[in-house]
Amino acid sequence: MKRFDYTRAATPAEAIAASAAEGAVYLGGGTNLLDLMKGNVLRPDRLVDVTHVAGLDRIERLPDGSTRVGALVRNGDLAHDPAFAKSYPAVAEALLSGASAQLRNAATTGGNLLQRTRCPYFTDGVSACNKRVPGSGCDAVGGDTRLHAVLGWSDSCIAVHPSDFCVPLAALGATVEIEGKGGPRSVPLVEFHRLPGDEPQRETVLEPGDLVTAVVLPAEAAGFAAHSRYLKVRDRTSYAFAVVSAAAALKLDGDRVAEARLAFGGVALKPWRSAEAEAALRGQPATVASFRRAAEVALADAKPSGDNSYKIELARRIAVRAFTLALSGTPERVPALPASPFSSPLGVAAHA
């Protein structure tokens, strides 16, 4: 591992000032950053520790009914917070499907948003990768692409974003609060991550020194609590990133869909929300046939990047399955195998 300087910040202003130096990065839970440093994939000159910045470890219900989750709230604490899990069950289920209990107890809200792709051509440290060394090329193109993108990719990068947490956040219209040299600002989560284009090294809209301080779920997101699910197809249920995942939520007017939300994970370099599919469902009968038509709309622009065409059909099917389970109602308990399409509803009493 390369030698680095270490700075501990106590306030957002201190953190932003300390990160002004070239080669500085923020350290939260470190569950992704430290792994990449050990493998010499990332070689920062300075770590700015933000784990002692006051006020970033709170879950707050705001006067307008929205919920603000501080950037230092641990994934495990958020998933098991009873009020949060009851209001946003798909988010809790997504969190519990990610990583292991030990990692969830260390990983943070802000770090989850900013985790790097698990593309092996990026993490091996030696393959040509435009994310790691801009302009070097992308060895994934023409390589092993089974787990790579089918939406929004370019010839410069075909990687996918690995987060489970971000998928229901995108579906539910979450925003990201940011502090920077120019002051505070808020960005919709669907605009926070960038598609690769010809600059895949720029993964988010953050500018140098910007610090993520919170994620906010709007008041109306809790209106989907009765009919929302997160499902994840993975190579092994115990601990693996999504091959394809989907967050689906419904508001019903009798036997028709009043409002719908749909977002995918594992298909692009960002959580992929489909406003087109949501519009296609609005006012339609809440039936499997309607869900299938919406899934077709959602994947209309998908194209394989090599040998992963199966992902397109898999994404269609997981969307239909997620909507079908959402229609039947959010279970009172988080399933014993969170987010698995095949799990029993009996599990952790976090939604009760």
Image (cartoon, rainbow, N blue to C red):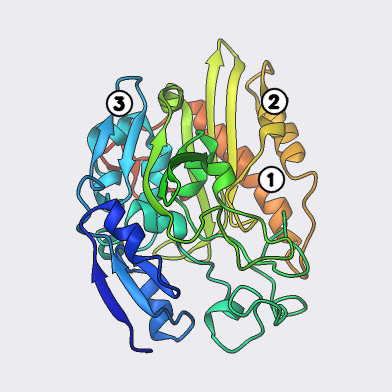
Estimate the spatial distance between the alpha carbons at disc 1 and disc 3, rounded to whole Å: 36 Å
At label 2, the amino acid type is Ala
At label 1, the amino acid type is Arg
Mark 2 vs 3, N-terminal side: 3
Mark 1 vs 3, N-terminal side: 3
User: In the figure, residue 161 lies in which quadrant?
Assistant: bottom right
Q: Measured from the top left, where is residue 225 in percent x and y?
A: 41, 27
The residue at 72%/80% (across/down) is: 137
69 in relation to 285, above or below: below
Q: Nearer the viewer, mark 1 or mark 3?
A: 3
Q: Measured from the top left, where is residue 308 in percent x and y?
A: 73, 65
The residue at 37%/40% (across/down) is: 345
Q: Nearer the viewer, mark 2 or mark 3?
A: 3
> Label 1: which residue?
316
Whether residues under marks 1 and 2 lie with C-beta atoms below 8 angstroms apart, the answer is no
Whether residues under marks 1 and 3 lie with C-beta atoms below 8 angstroms apart, the answer is no
Lateral position of residue 105 relative to residue 162, left or right? left
The numbered dot on residue 62 is: 3
Residue at disc 3, secondary structure: loop
The residue at 59%/36% (across/down) is: 262
User: In the figure, residue 32 lies in which quadrant?
Assistant: bottom left
User: From this viewpoint, is residue 313 visible?
Assistant: yes
219 in relation to 48, above or below: above
Q: Quadrant of the N terminus?
A: bottom left
Q: Residues within 10 Å of mark 2 (few under 14, many from 20)?
A: some
The numbered dot on residue 279 is: 2
Residue at disc 1, secondary structure: helix
Estimate the spatial distance between the alpha carbons at disc 2 and disc 3, rounded to whole Å: 29 Å
